[in-house]
Image: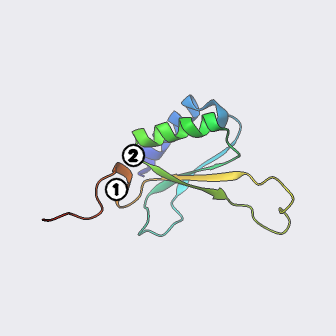
């Protein structure tokens, strides 16, 4: 995502998804391979309830974005602790995946 778009999406998430209040949200340059995504990403580190997840997904669909989910804190020290979920929101470089277009052209 471009920086301005990422800021706009972040504001929309905070305005519409009450479950995000008081949790860690970060806007940063993408740290993934430039072949996968480019620009900026939004990182959310918290365990989210189903209502908040649904709210986030609705906003992502509207902006044709996607996310990766997983636990970021898997170390020997944290084995007995509740690990916060990590959601990384981004726009795939190949926008065909985000908008549901076919990955290859079909010819007769």
Q: Which mark is residue 20?
A: none
The residue under label 1 is 95
Q: Residue furthest front?
A: 108
Q: Nearer the viewer, residue 58 or 93?
A: 58
**Label 2 neighbourhood size at 10 Å, few (<14), some (14-19), many (20+)?**
some
Residue 35 pos. (x, y %): 41, 69
The residue positioned 42% from the left and 44% from the top of the image is 5
Q: Residue furthest left?
A: 108
- Any mark on residue 64, and which? 2
At x 67%, y 38%, the residue is 49
> Tag 1 or tag 2, which sits nearer the N-term?
2
Rendering quarter of residue 62: top left
Q: Position of residue 56 (x, y in %)?
A: 54, 39
Left or right: residue 45 compared with residue 66 = right
Q: Residue at x 48, y 55 (%)?
A: 40
**Side of 68 relative to 91 (left or right):** right
| Disc 2 from disc 1: Cα separation | 8 Å
In the rendered view, tell whether residue 36 sits above or below residue 89.
below
Q: Position of residue 58 (x, y in %)?
A: 48, 37
Residue 22: name its quadrant. top right
Relative to 77, is 21 above or below? Answer: above
The local secondary structure at tag 1 comes to: helix
* Quarter holding residue 28: bottom right
């Amino acid at each position: 995502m471009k920086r301005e778009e990422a800021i706009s999406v972040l504001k929309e998430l905070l305005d519409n998804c009450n479950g995000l209040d008081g949790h860690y949200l970060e806007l940063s340059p993408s740290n993934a391979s430039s072949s996968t995504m480019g620009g900026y990403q939004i990182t959310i580190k918290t365990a989210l309830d189903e209502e908040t997840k649904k709210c986030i997904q609705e906003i992502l669909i509207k902006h044709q974005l996607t996310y990766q989910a997983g636990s970021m804190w898997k170390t020997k020290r944290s084995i007995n602790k509740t690990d916060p979920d990590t959601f990384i929101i981004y726009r795939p470089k190949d926008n065909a995946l985000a908008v549901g277009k076919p990955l290859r052209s079909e010819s007769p």
